[in-house]
């Protein structure tokens, strides 16, 4: 279409102009890249669309339960993209699970040693987002048989409080593994004191870190 042939884009994070690349063929990405694009026809310009692409050799994580299409944070690699969610639930960096547990299997890069595995969870009670009741870490060396390393229980609120973030950390310094499985248990339904009593609760998880 005419509009499609008037798309201009940049690959360095700068604002596109009439002198920028003109979109004609699919764009090939070989490294981490920020693409900014907009339609320019005569003197009329659309708003800028920004997309950040991260190249990685990490295999795609395996989700036992799918994340929300509304709160996807960018897709299957979102939990490993180096971006951290804030106390603002809609900042685009949180991955949400409504009514389901967050259960994720990640294949680990054996060339890099890790002493700790960390992850963040959001609580925003006004948005029906609760901390999981517990978070477990399991590990495996054969891709199928997982051994429980530890389970961390999380106290649940008895009244409203401000949005906050909880960091969960597991010590894996003496463990040899090729895969990990994170199991965050959804409390299921809003408690009786909550305005959404009986409604499905959300788990919001972000950035899984492997620290040396």
Image (spheres, rainbow, N blue to C red):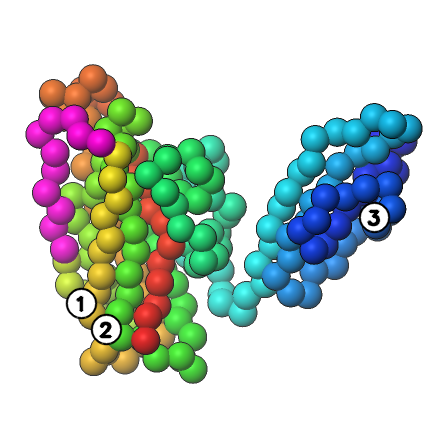
Question: Which span is picked out in magenta?
Answer: 152-162
Residue 172 image label: 2
Foreground label between 3 and 2: 3
- Residue closest to the eye, 82 or 96: 82
Residue 149 image label: 1
Looking at the rendered structure, the number of numbered marks drawn on it comes to: 3
Q: Are marks 1 and 3 in contact (CB under 8 Å)?
A: no
Picture coordinates of residue 62, whole percent (x, y): 42, 56
- Residue closest to the eye, 55 or 103: 55
Which quadrant of the structure image shows residue 157?
A: top left
Q: Identify the element where label 3 is drawn.
A: loop
Local packing at callout 2 (Cα closer than 10 Å; few below 14, some 14-19, many 20+) is some
Can I make out residue 164 in this image? yes
Residue 20 image label: 3
Q: Is residue 69 left or right of residue 136?
A: right
Residue 157 part of the magenta-drawn span: yes
Query: What residue is at 30 percent from the left and 27 percent from the top?
Result: 127
Residue 191 image label: none
Q: Is residue 87 left or right of residue 69?
A: left
Which quadrant of the structure image shows residue 82?
A: bottom left
């Amino acid at each position: 279409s005419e509009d499609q042939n008037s798309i201009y884009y940049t690959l360095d994070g700068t604002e596109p102009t009439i002198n920028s690349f003109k979109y004609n063929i699919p764009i090939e990405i070989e490294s981490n890249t920020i693409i900014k694009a907009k339609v320019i026809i005569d003197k009329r310009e659309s708003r800028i669309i920004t997309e950040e692409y991260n190249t990685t050799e990490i295999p795609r994580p395996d989700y036992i339960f799918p994340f929300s299409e509304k709160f996807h944070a960018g897709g299957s690699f979102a939990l490993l993209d180096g971006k951290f969610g804030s106390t603002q639930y809609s900042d685009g960096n949180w991955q949400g699970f409504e009514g389901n547990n967050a259960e994720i299997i990640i294949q680990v890069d054996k060339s890099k040693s890790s002493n700790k595995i960390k992850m963040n969870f959001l609580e925003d009670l006004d948005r029906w987002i609760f901390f999981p009741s517990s978070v477990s870490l399991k590990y495996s060396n054969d891709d199928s048989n997982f051994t429980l390393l530890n389970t961390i229980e999380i106290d649940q609120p008895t009244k409203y409080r401000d949005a906050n973030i909880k960091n969960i950390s597991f010590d894996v310094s003496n463990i040899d593994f090729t895969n990990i499985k994170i199991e965050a248990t959804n409390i299921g339904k809003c408690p009786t004191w909550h305005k959404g009593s009986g409604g499905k609760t959300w788990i919001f998880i972000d950035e899984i870190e492997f620290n040396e």
